[in-house]
Amino acid sequence: MSHRAWSLGLLVVVSCASRTAADGAAAAPDATTPETAAAVKAAFARELEALGQSDFSTPGGFAGKVEASSAPVIQGGGEFDTVKISLGTEQTLECMLHPERIDGGGTLRRFAEMVAEKLELKALAGVDIRPIGGSPLLFAELVYLADSPAGKMAGLLKLGLLAHETHSMICTHDEPGYSQTFRRVVTGLAESLTREGEDPLARAAFAEVQICTIGETKVGYVEQALWKNPAKGEHLEAHTSHIIPKAGANFSVIDTIRTVTTDTAAVLIEDISVVVVDNQIGTQLRLASEDGGKTYTYQGTVNGEALEGSFAAKQPLTTELGRARRYAAKAGGGPAGEQRFASYEPNVNPKDATEVIYRKDAATPGQLEVGAAEPLVKVRVDEHGLFERTEFPIGKTAMICTRAFARGAP
């Protein structure tokens, strides 16, 4: 999907938010007196009981069912289809359905930037992540103020973002309150949403979603899927999105894509990594071997610097999946003590192999310490040796990523 199509879709939503706030509709007075403070609190606390279910289909081949007070209105024919859902409130809930993957964090960032251009963005709130059949559904709320004839008005733009290879979704509702209603309606729609044609995720041998938190705050997700081909090897694809809070309404977003391909002998033959920070590409690298893992070539950019070269592997490069199988339950939980593996870690050294340390905790089965340098990351592995809980130190605190959904086996 083109960036222009994204921008047009977001612009329509934000322009509507600007107009309704300026007209005083679907907004609440700024809390400057006890009376208006009570009115704002009441407006933001509104919720709805469950509504009736309506089936729908679109010209782009999407289909599903959704809670609504009347039949949804469908628009299509372009690069995305739109479902307009009436809740019986002042504003409709709208969902743009896309036939390819979106970046959850990057899309949220674009909305925030466009709101801040037209309105006074006050806060990012209500971040939540839910696994939907192996895909992440990201919720967030943008609280804003806008000028109107009646003075400053408070608004609430609610977002629901589903990232999927063949049927992604961007849902919005611009009206104070109905936060839990919005999440219930969008979750139900996401669970029912399908699209004509093949769904690659359904063919994956293994799929998982992990949710990352700092304290009690959800800050991102990790999504992974593994495909196996006995004649060619294995292909692992991972998508991550992290939302880093800053002062006030500011936040940064880091989206990553990593694809790792091994041959039938479990030798790494291709590794592609992309890191996008605040919608700007920071890293874009491809590593490949055409001689069975003896020599590797790399090409791409890191922080705007072009890189191209090659290196000889002193020993076969391992992958996270390959190392996991060393620590699986059927392998006895892995070797005791400390082991060192050759790996490709482009965030550490994009020009050569990196030694990765695995240190087994003899006193606690399933516990490892892993990393390229001290301090190592604390990890809990499942029966397959895969990371199901990872604790990344961040100063005096930590970001913890914990598995919330898994299907299949590696």
Image (tube, rainbow, N blue to C red):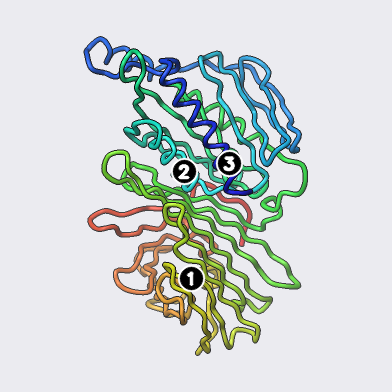
Query: Quarter of the image holding residue 142?
Result: top left
Reading the chain from its start, which is encountered first: label 3 or label 1? 3
- Comes first in the chain, label 3 or label 2: 2
Q: Which residue is mark 2?
A: 110
Q: How far apart, in angstroms, are the residues tagged by discs 3 and 1?
A: 34 Å
* Residue 306 to residue 366: above or below: below
Task: Relative to 365, say whether 41 is above or below.
Answer: above
Question: In front: mark 3 or mark 2?
Answer: 2
The residue indicated by pointer 1 is 301
Residue 236 image point, x, y percent: 60, 63
Towards the viewer: 222 or 311? 311
Residue underneath mark 3: 132
At x 47%, y 66%, the residue is 283
**10 Å crowding of disc 3: few (<14), some (14-19), many (20+):** some
Q: CA distance from mark 3 to mark 2?
A: 23 Å
Disc 3 residue type (three-letter): Ile
